[in-house]
Image (tube, rainbow, N blue to C red):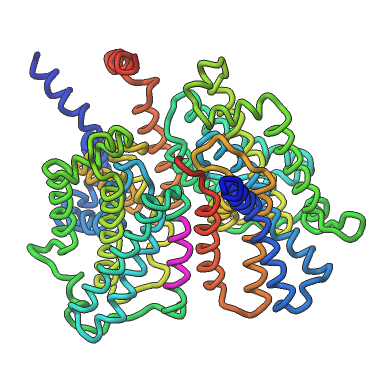
Amino acid sequence: MSTAKKIYDWFSKRSSLTAFLFLFIIAGIAFSGRSFLSFNSLANLMRKAASDGGFLALGMTFVILIGQIDLSVGAILAMGGVIMALFGNTHPLLGIFLGLLVGAVCGFANGFMVAKLKISSWIATLAMMLGLRGIVLLITNKKPIPIRNDILAVLGNATFFNINVLVFILVALTLICMLIARNTKFGFGIYAVGGNEDAAKMMGLSVDKIKIGAFVLCGTFSALAGMLLGSRLNTCQPTAGDSWETTAIAMCALGGIKLSGGEGKFSGTFFGILIITIIKTMFNYAGFLNSWWQNIIMGILIMVSIGVQSELFQGKETKQIKKKANA
Amino acid sequence: MADSRLARVDKVEKLRKYSVWILLSLMLILNLAITPNFFSMGMLNNLITQSCTIILTGMGMTMVISTGGIDISVGAVMALSGMVSVKMLPFGIIPSILSGILASLVFGSIAGFMVGRLRVSPMVVTLALLIGVRGVAQVLNDAKIFYISGANTDTYRLLGSYKVLGIFPVQLIPIFLAIGITFFILEKTVLGRYIQTVGDNPHSAKLAGISTTKTLLFVYMASAFFASIAGIFATAKIGAADGNSLGLLSELDAIAAVAVGGTSMAGGRAMVFGTVVGALIMQLITITVNMNNIPYEYAQVFKAIIIILAVYIQREKNS
């Protein structure tokens, strides 16, 4: 195999990385006059990726990998932030602990409804989204909660080497997720359940526990996202994260996570997050296009990416393998 | 003894079958007790006017979900059809409505093609449409609200304010037509059998010679069609087309109504009248809260509980 073919194969296997690099180069050339490639603007790009839905997408990946969906991530984000702001004023650790706990409990409730009560994840998490958002609005009386604790107020704005701490947390969490997916029994179980639930059951995996585990992780990540967002802005909005679930799903879809479950990598989600962020950044830079054009472009981009992944455009080899597998 | 146990199972079975109706009656009784002036013509007209959107989108959603799919783009399609129809209003009322429907059908057919032919997950396709179509609706008027004015305004506004027989709001007509057409298609035609078979088992449907591609194409176009009608009526009622907020989150209302109504989310079982009752329950909750000066957030929490409860009671065993 020639080197060119090897390189081509390496990139075609990592389609979301390739797409990101492609967009990155375009942005770099188009906005070279406005120092897009400077350290500051790249650090800014990464910070946006981390604060605007990156953590939600990581959590969502667990849920999508087991073949389910979680619409409540935005509401859990708001809940996590508000709980941290309310209790963090007495002691920061109490706020952080309770915030994460609320996220985990909401995730557990989602998982319980899906795994034990056998309610479709669409409906269960839709109800969670409605109900939780209502509760958040009720306990905050629709007003933003300011963070008065010094430590919590500084946490989200801390920088190392001029890079926001959120970026390090996002990268670290991505690496941890990759490790979980590759090296643990739980990670193996996620792919097994998403690929074929009946087969996973026959293999002796405790399918219910894996499902609940995935939802708990998703809930915890969402709450963490809300806490970090609140800490960065020094205030927790009860309407934070509204309709961010679509952004998170789009990030996963662009990251090559198969929406019916069982296939996809966390590294893919990471680049999916970056793709959405860089598109938004490009629109900010461009300026001459109305910002709502970015919705149209994003829609088309998702369409194209899933169209390419679909059966019609798959190579002959894959088709033959699938035929054999079916027969 | 076995007999009595069978009878009990039968009773539970019946209870489950009629659970939405019981829930609706409970809601009505509750309202009669606590809501002032509940039993009045004005309240009935309110209910009809407000539930138009959710019933229309719910009808399309019932078809889509009974094929095992989902369509979360209905809210965006509503905004698009409202915006297009108002933009085309100077050319006459008929071209205006037709262009609104046509624009929506284009996107419905894209969804149907992607799901039916390319076998892409319906959620991602309609998610992309949800984002993209909303963008189109916004771009059409620079994300500003487009107030109805100029030629044909009065005719268009009649779609929101006309009274049938001088009493009932005009929204009654699309509601009845949508329910009738959907019921007829799903229960009385071969196509309806196809739709539910595709949802039950796509593989065996294919073996039976059913064209899943065409069936799915029809279903998603029907959903877009109903959504566009809902969008036009909502726009006429408000008197302005708002690309940003028209139909926002109405896909969730529709999904909730369908789920409460007993249509299986896995596909294969469509309950048209269940969806209607589900929609009425959702709307009654809103009315109850509004009429009694309770903060709307309680309605959200209450709706969430009702959704989970209804779906839990009606879920099929071993599914």
Q: Is residue A14 left or right of residue A69?
A: left
B71 over A50 or under it: above or below: above
Q: Is residue A266 left or right of residue B13?
A: left
Q: Is residue A90 left or right of residue B79?
A: left
The mark tally for this picture is 0
Please give the name of the residue rendered at 50% of the width and 68% of the height, measured from the top-left corner: B301
Q: Quadrant of residue A264?
A: top left
Please give the name of the residue rendered at 61% of the width and 33% of the height, measured from the top-left corner: B221
The picture places residue A154, in percent across and down from the top left corner, at 18, 76
Magenta: main secondary structure: helix
The picture places residue B229, in percent across and down from the top left corner, at 69, 45
Magenta residues? A126-136
Residue A296 visible in this rendered orientation of the protein: yes
Pick the residue in front: B23 or B36. Answer: B23
Residue B79 visible in this rendered orientation of the protein: no
The picture places residue A260, in percent across and down from the top left corner, at 37, 36
Given the current orientation, which residue lies at the most extreme front position? B1
Given the current orientation, which residue lies at the most extreme right position? B165
Pick the residue in front: B69 or B92. Answer: B69
A202 inside magenta stretch: no
Q: Quadrant of residue A165?
A: bottom left
B289 over A178 or under it: above or below: below
Pick the residue in front: B67 or B49. Answer: B67
Q: Quadrant of residue B62?
A: top right
Please give the name of the residue rendered at 52% of the width and 59% of the height, measured from the top-left corner: B309
B311 over B179 or under it: above or below: below
Please give the name of the residue rendered at 56% of the width and 15% of the height, measured from the top-left corner: B209
The picture places residue A269, in percent across and down from the top left corner, at 25, 44
